[in-house]
Amino acid sequence: MAKRLPARRLDGVEYNPWVEFTKLVREYDVVNLGQGFPNFPPPDFAVEAFQQATSGDFMLNQYTMAFVIIIEPFFDCYESMTLMARGRPVFVSLKPSPTGDGELDFSSNWQLDPTELASKFTSRTKALVLNTPNNPLGKVFSKAELELVASLCQQHDVLCFADEVYQLLVYDGVQHISIASLPGMWDRTLTIGSAGKIFGATGWKVGWALGPNHILRHLQTVHQNSIFHCPTQAQAAVAKSFEWEQLHMGQPGSYFEEFPKAMQRNRDHMTHSLQTVGLKPVVPHGGYFLIADISDFKSKMPDLPGAAEEPYDRRFVKWMIINKGLMAIPVSIFYSVPHQKDFDHYIRFCFVKDEATLQAMDKQLQKWKALR
């Protein structure tokens, strides 16, 4: 269990006596007998040992980095957050299964290779980031897939950061399962939620983290020393919103039941509309987004303007904005650099929009279709 708490360096940082007292040392002319640094050289044998260490194993000069497994495609901040925490991201990709000609693809067809996933775990692996439902793919991980991840996390004593901000937005009767609910996972899982996503108020920026106290207390230490202001009014609004929904749960008009139904209709509308111009949607089972395959466009017009090293989907989105009046997000941004070229034939659309926006989309697609 000790390996699961690499941030012990944060214990007690809510109060730092060294800062308080060294300020006084600078302000007054004193003999510093407080700080524990000798003001004379170390013994010769210690100096020699240091010299040997610096000229020997070069890895002794480096940080001992925590390896963090990130499942691709991933929300793009995961990689930078890992790097800022002095971790090393290790990537493993969901891969699509082949579909027949004319058949719709579904996010559930994108799966992890169990052998490849297992190969990413080493003695230096400290954590795995799991996003379900996934952004941008909309994949909801099945119980069998979660059990595979859980088994590996327990086998290698690894923490799981479960980003479940879209947990209530699932479609087609698919069930969202929290990995923390599986046997042996509560004590090693930090589950992240978002009121902004659940209540469609993303500007509120209110979320939460659930987990055992031995993990949460370290998160709290980091948080209280990083964030000065919190959106108090938004927090109160979220609390009231949950109270309201609790009273209406399971009844006609329950928001947690009606909102997913409405967004499933939007998803189906967008799926049909995008197909009219040759885009091939990957139908999501959860979340705000769907991705569409642009492989046919890549083969028919491969030389879109842009830098030679720029992934095709980024050039396509720019072309689509300028020439078709539609904006999407290139999916390659949700991949590590080595894998971007392998997945540069997808673009992401958000279907959590009002009816007027969907109608405006249809109008632009009709113009596009007329010119094909």
Image (tube, rainbow, N blue to C red):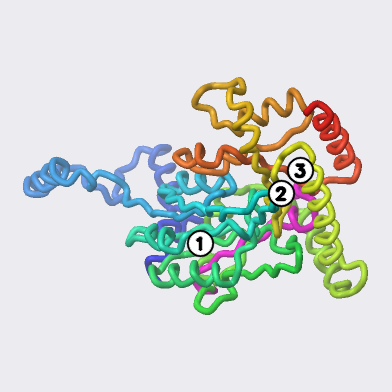
Q: Which residues are magenta?
A: 186-208
Neighbourhood count class around disc 1 (C-alpha, 10 Å): few under 14, some 14–19, many 20 upward: some
Query: Along the polypeptide, which appears first: circle 3 or circle 2?
Result: 3
Q: Residue at x 68, y 42 (%)?
A: 348
Q: Nearer the viewer, residue 121 or 185?
A: 121
How far apart are the two marked residues, 3 and 2, measured between alpha carbons? 16 Å
Question: Residue 66 lies in magenta, yes or no?
Answer: no
Spatial separation of the CA atoms under disc 3 and disc 1? 48 Å
**Residue matched to label 1:** 218
Dot 2: within a 10 Å radius of its alpha carbon, few (fewer than 14), some, or many (20 or more) residues?
Answer: many
Alpha carbon of mark 1 to alpha carbon of mark 2: how far? 33 Å
245 vs 304, left or right, is right
Q: Residue at x 40, y 44 (%)?
A: 22
User: In terms of depth relative to the viewer, which is nearer, 121 or 186?
Assistant: 121
Q: Which residue is mark 2?
A: 289
Q: How many marks?
A: 3
Tag 3 secondary structure: helix
The quadrant of the picture occupied by the C terminus is top right
Query: Measured from the top left, where is residue 339 in percent x and y?
Result: 48, 42
Identify residue for label 3. Answer: 275
Residue drawn at (65%, 42%) of the image: 293
Q: Is residue 42 visible?
A: no
Q: Amino acid at mark 1?
A: His
Amino acid type for the residue under numbered disc 3: Gln
**Residue at horizontal 41 percent and vertical 58 percent from the top:** 116
From what the image shows, is residue 26 above or below residue 142? above
* For residue 331, side relative to residue 42 (left or right): right
Q: Position of residue 269 (x, y in %)?
A: 83, 49
**Type of residue at label 2?**
Phe
Image coordinates of residue 115 in percent, x first then y, are 41, 62
Q: Is residue 264 above or below residue 187?
A: above
